């Protein structure tokens, strides 16, 4: 379970979705599918998941000072919880 979900994504946009739509975003393992992510969230946080949307963020060209570089390849999952279920994150 802990190898599927890497970390919660705490941003301004995600915080808005948490309060209004009851959706939470996580960085997840690239090889994890929707059903594995659903099972992991339900087991770790003791909540009922209604829907899981996933997206792969591709490598992106960026400059690292003067030299060119790339951002890493990672996968994001947006999890919608049942009405009344929620959990809080502590931003670090």
Image (cartoon, rainbow, N blue to C red):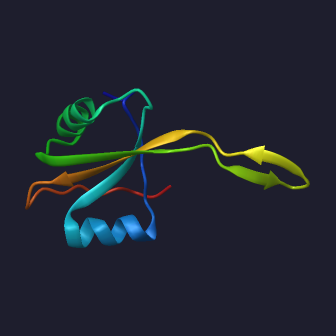
Query: Which residue ends up furthest to the right in the rendered image?
Result: 66
Total of numbered circles in the picture? Answer: 0
In this view of the protein, which residue sits in the foreground, 52 or 25?
Answer: 52
Quarter of the view holding residue 37: top left
Q: Is residue 79 positioned above or below 13 on the image?
A: above
- Horizontal and vertical percent position of residue 62: 74, 53
Residue at figure coordinates x 50%, y 55% from the top left: 92
Residue at figure coordinates x 91%, y 54% from the top left: 66
Residue at figure coordinates x 45%, y 64% from the top left: 11
Relative to 46, 91 lies left or right: right
Residue at figure coordinates x 21%, y 37% from the top left: 38
- Horizontal and vertical percent position of residue 40: 25, 33
Q: Is residue 59 positioned above or below 35 on the image?
A: below
Q: Is residue 3 positioned above or below 51 on the image?
A: above
In this view of the protein, which residue sits in the foreground, 12 or 57?
Answer: 57
- Horizontal and vertical percent position of residue 27: 43, 44
- Horizontal and vertical percent position of residue 74: 51, 40
Q: Is residue 60 positioned above or below 88 on the image?
A: above
Relative to 37, 51 lies left or right: left
- Say which quadrant the N terminus sits in: top left
In this view of the protein, which residue sits in the foreground, 39 or 35?
Answer: 35
Query: Which residue ends up furthest to the left in the rendered image?
Result: 83
């Amino acid at each position: 379970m802990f190898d599927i979900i890497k970390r919660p994504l705490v941003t301004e946009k995600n915080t808005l979705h948490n309060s209004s739509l009851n959706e939470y975003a996580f960085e997840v393992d690239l090889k994890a599918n929707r059903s594995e992510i659903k099972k992991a969230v339900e087991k770790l946080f003791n909540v009922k998941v209604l829907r899981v949307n996933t997206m792969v963020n591709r490598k992106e060209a960026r400059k690292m000072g003067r030299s060119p570089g790339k951002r890493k390849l990672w996968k994001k999952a947006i999890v919608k919880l049942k009405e009344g279920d929620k959990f809080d994150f502590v931003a670090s």
